[in-house]
Amino acid sequence: MTRVDIKRDLDALNKQIAAANRALFKSAGLYVINLMGSPGSGKTTLLENILPRLQDHVRTAVIEGDLATENDALRIRKTGVTALQINTNGGCHLDARMIENQLSRLDLAALDLLIIENVGNLVCPASFDLGEDLRMVLLSVPEGADKPVKYPTAFLNAQAVAITKTDLLPYLNVDLDEMKRYMAEINPKLVVFETALKGGVYEAERLVAYILEQVRQKKGK
């Protein structure tokens, strides 16, 4: 009897489709971010606050991934940015095929930046290439300094981390330097940003500048 390794075949298929997605993004000059983080880490809130700033400079769209509802896509649309919703109906991650199926709904030539907000999870999404240029993990201060060592794969395969809710540090027993040290031990190449809500203003200037620079570099500007 021939043994079929279904997991290996599915991994190979996902990589094949991700490569096709990546080639399509490259031909369109489109920069793509795969945004990952735990439920409640602040992914949609971050997007709500940085998208208007990004949209002032680059044409942007968002793909939202959730088990159910269109709540996050509705929130994003209120910023004026196009948002498509993928419901996985219980699935813990997005895969390359799901993204491929949405691309015909977007005019890629009319975009500079596509942000994919993955399903809230730091385990499954880390194993699936979507064809992105940048994999960014969101880590909120309330999750604790040791979160990176509990979920190392997510950080090992990322290029950037945005630490959210740093304004809560005075109220929590969390060592931000320890959190950063753990991340550096897992992946010394990580670029780390801090965001905070202070006085009603969402502070993420360095992150916005970084994303804009990555987009410009890909488009050769």
Image (cartoon, grey):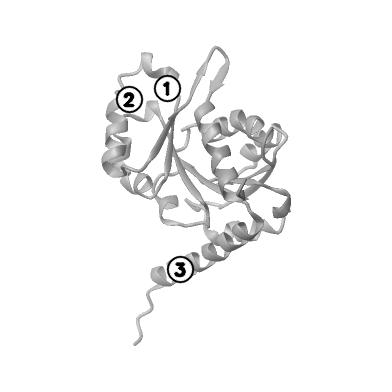
Q: In this view of the protein, can residue 150 be seen by the observer? A: yes
Q: Earlier in the sequence, mark 1 or mark 2?
A: 1
Quarter of the image holding residue 142? top left
For the residues marked 2 and 3, what is the alpha-carbon distance in whole angstroms?
38 Å
Q: Residues within 10 Å of mark 3 (few under 14, many from 20)?
A: few
Decide: is 198 above or below 40. above
For the residues marked 1 and 3, what is the alpha-carbon distance in whole angstroms?
39 Å
- Mark 1 vs mark 3: in front: 1
Which residue position holds label 2?
176
Would you say the residues marked 2 and 3 are in contact, meaning their CB atoms lie under 8 Å apart?
Answer: no
Point out the image quarter for the N terminus. Answer: bottom left
Q: Residue at x 65, y 46 (%)?
A: 112
Residue 170 in percent (x, y) is at 37, 13
The amino acid at mark 2 is Leu
Which residue position holds label 3?
10
The amino acid at mark 3 is Leu
Q: Residue at x 55, y 12 (%)?
A: 199
Farthest residue, direction front: 221
Which residue position holds label 1?
166
Element under disc 3? helix
